[in-house]
Amino acid sequence: MLVTSASMTRGRHYGIVLVLGMSLMGCISTPAQPPQTIGFTRAANVTGTDSLWVMKDDGSEQVPLNVGADGNRSMTWSPDGNSIAFESVRDGNLGIYTARILKNRDGTYSAQDVQRRTTASADDSFPAWSHDCSLLAFSSKRPNQPYSSLWQLDLSSNTASPLTSGYEDSSPAWSPDGSKIAFTRSSENGSREIYVHVMSSAQDIRLTNNAVNDRDPSWSPSGRIIFARHSEDGTRSALFEMDAVDANGDGNGDHLTAVSSPQANEYDQKPEYSDNGKAVVFFRSQETGGGGPGDVWKLVVQDGTVMEPIVNLTQTKGHHEHGATWRRNGVCARRAK
């Protein structure tokens, strides 16, 4: 069982007892690891022009990542850490782009071979890499399509094909084994809910079922789903985790547990696990409704415990940092034939 140190101490940013051990069971103490790299989006203010940045996971060495134009966001690293996908408005509408990323001798990063991958007149957003680096899932409202749905882009041919046909489907995240895609869908009552699309059957399985907004799903290394949930009174948004299955058919993922415990007017959003499952990055907005400027935060898991305090990595006032994502250090899995 994973617990938070807040069960023993009290402070401004505290957590609650968790059962996240299913995600990280068997964790043991290990020597300190070298800093990892985090990509994120920064703007001068909430309505300002977005640009891509990178930093170390202790918040140091914050530098812009030049991809040839401004107006870029929703950066995500390929599983092998050699490329990124991102959104950009540089060509008039929101499209999906990729770039090859090189690490320079001074520790900074540079982008090469920037390519536009989607060319439809519709806005394309929220790119997500498949585990074999060959595909991107993304959200799009194509011509003659009443709502946004998920699409799949083959990077070898830039051919896009539909995956879902729901109501305002967005924020896809591929599972570690490539068999499922978690995403957000608007429900009949207007709330946002978490679903999983099964690649082999094209079935969409609902994993949250309530009157509040659930959004921004991503996967733990062991295959659980972490996401953001608004409180019933709308005063905060916390991070939760659950199994990617609904064994009893009640429309909810099994073994739901809380990960963060924000104060009033603190909105935790877009969480993402590190490769080793020992840390989570997310962004927190601290204005009523969650629409204010955000900072990138990190919580650390040590020996099965979510450690306190959680850490504000960017600590800027007025600037808006969001969309934090880990640089991956794995490999592109072999594509099934």
Image (spheres, grey):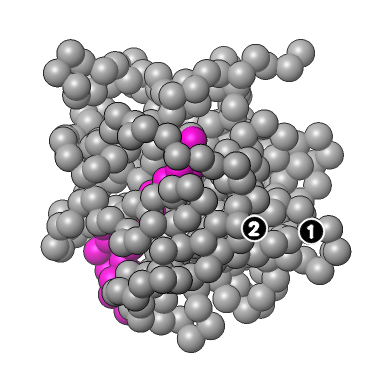
Quadrant for residue 139, please give it: top right
Estimate the x, y position of residue 90 in percent, counting from the top left. 29, 36
Given the image, on which type of amino acid does mark 2 rest?
Met
Span colored in magenta: 276-295
- Density class for disc 1 (Cα within 10 Å; few <14, some 14-19, many ≥20) is some
Determine the residue positioned at 21% across, 28% down: 66
- Report the quarter where the N terminus lies: bottom right
Q: Quadrant of the C terminus?
A: top right
Asked if residue 6 is positioned above or below residue 306 in the image, the reply reads: below
Q: Nearer the viewer, residue 195 or 263?
A: 263
Distance (Cα) linking label 1 and label 2:
10 Å
Q: Amino acid at mark 1?
A: Asp
- Kindly identify which residue carries mark 1: 246
Q: Which residue is mark 2?
A: 242
Q: Residue at x 81, y 69 (%)?
A: 250
Q: Which quarter of the figure has residue 32?
A: top left
Above or below, 160 relative to 323: above
